[in-house]
Image (cartoon, rainbow, N blue to C red):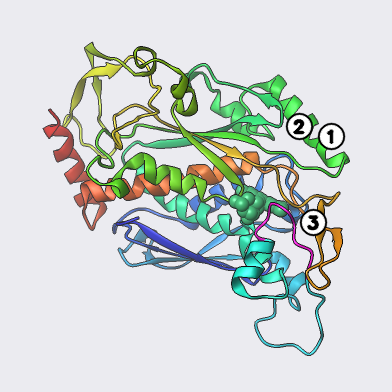
Amino acid sequence: MGQFRFLTGGESHGKGLIAIVEGMVAALPLEEEYINQELKRRQQGYGRGPRMKIEEDKAEIMAGVRYGLTIGSPIALFITNRDWQNWQEQLSVSPIEKEVEPVTCPRPGHADLAGVSKYGLKDIRPIMERASARETAARVAVGAIARRFLEEFDIVIRSHTVAIGPHRWERPKASSVNWGQVEASPVRCGHAELGKAMMAAIDEAKASGDTLGGIFEVIATGVPIGLGSHVSWDRRLDGRIARAIMSINAVKGVEIGAGFALAGLKGSQAHDVIKPLTRTLSLEGRGLGEGEGKQSLRWRHATNRAGGIEGGISNSEDIIVKAAVKPIATLASPLPSIDLRSGEKTKAHYERSDICVVPAGGVIGEAMLAIVLADACLEKLGGDNLKETLANYRNYLSNIS
Ligand SMILES: Cc1cc2nc3c(=O)[nH]c(=O)nc-3n(C[C@H](O)[C@H](O)[C@H](O)COP(=O)(O)O)c2cc1C
């Protein structure tokens, strides 16, 4: 990450989450309500645990915005954890008299065992608190700022659920996803029947004390050609996206475009041939004035197996990313583990938990992709004020050969 950076802080059941966002241009319209809509989307999804009924995530903008416009200084955000009320002893910042029962039976698949060993702790609680995906609420808030910025370039980012457990829906083409249906679906699936099957699978898993994983897909449309670079490993856009998506809790695989399927194809079947266009394709963005700096591409890729990136550079096609989400590690019928105090066999720790987080994962994936693309846009276009960045964009588009 270069131009657009952020850090988050906060424990799952602490007072709240904070994020400090650096590098956003001045004069970008930004309101709390815009951020809160995204937070709400993250909280939904069939298969979430009771925690999401307690929380009603709202971000408070503490700095960096004046009269509804960014001012170029770091943007500071705060999201209250309502549940903190119930955890004041376990998460007390000051020492307390009372002895709180430590968590000592690590959950296989969670950060518990590696975390306590690494940090030299006897109680798993601090590890669970920060490894929890509650932290992703802060990322979604940061992602909303990135999304607001990308809107100025007509870049739109959406996600949908491809699979939950054994039920999988492959969309034939990006255009065939009914996004209204996805947003209305409790599992964010664009296929009604499969959506129902996914919900039934979640119910079944819940009834047997189990959990489920799956796959979500994130698609960015309107991305201009030329974000990222082939020249150095850490500037490659595909590498930056893969890292950002893989950093989401429980994501264990990332695929760009046809990804793993490409490995089994011949070169003649795998690549997206370039064809001339008789009709020119406009790259005009919302920020561009009428007829100003307009650039039209005279070609198009016949297919998009590359997922919009070639040589680490965006190639003007949709950016398509899939992520494999493993089943949640906290099981109501806990897996075998040991008690770290005695070394004896026991069951893993259990506390209130989600059953399936694939739908929420998609919303978090959108945020992470937005953050990477905002960063790549700022790197490509520069500027300290939105007007300047948009002028640079116009200039860039009118000079593409
Ligand atoms: C939105 C979301 C919610 C999650 N909720 C839970 C949960 O309730 N219980 C749980 O054990 N893991 C949950 N996880 C997954 C853990 O945070 C994750 O498995 C853990 O941090 C270990 O990291 P790893 O799976 O990436 O190795 C959730 C993940 C996401 C994306």
Distance, label 3 to label 1, CA atoms, is: 17 Å
Query: Which of these two is toward me, 165 or 24?
Result: 165
Magenta residues, as a range? 103-111
Magenta-drawn stretch contains 246: no
Image position of 351 (left or right of 110): right
Q: Pointers 3 and 1 in contact (CB under 8 A)?
A: no
For image coordinates 25% across by 20% down, the residue present is: 281
Residue drawn 28% across the image and 42% down it: 228
Helix, strand or loop at label 1? It is helix
Q: Amino acid at mark 2?
A: Met
Q: Position of residue 290 (x, y in %)?
A: 20, 31
Q: Residue at x 73, y 53 (%)?
A: 108
Which quadrant holds residue 5? bottom left
| Main SS, magenta residues | loop
| In this picture, residue 52 sits left or right of residue 174 | right
Q: CA distance from mark 1 to mark 2?
A: 9 Å
Query: For the residue with label 3, is its CB less than 8 Å from the closest atom of ligand 1?
Result: yes
Residue 349 in sight in this render: no
Q: How many residues crowd mark 3 within 10 Å: few (<14), some (14–19), many (20+)?
A: few
Residue at image mark 3: 352
- The residue tagged 2 is 199
| Magenta-colored stretch includes residue 106 | yes
Check the picture and name the quadrant holding the C terminus: top left
SS assignment at label 3? loop
Residue 339: image quadrant is bottom right
Image location (x, y in percent) of residue 251: 58, 44
Q: Which mark is residue 204?
A: 1
Q: Are marks 1 and 2 in contact (CB under 8 Å)?
A: no
- Binning the other alpha carbons within 10 Å of mark 2 as few (below 14), some (14 to 19) or many (20 upward) gives some
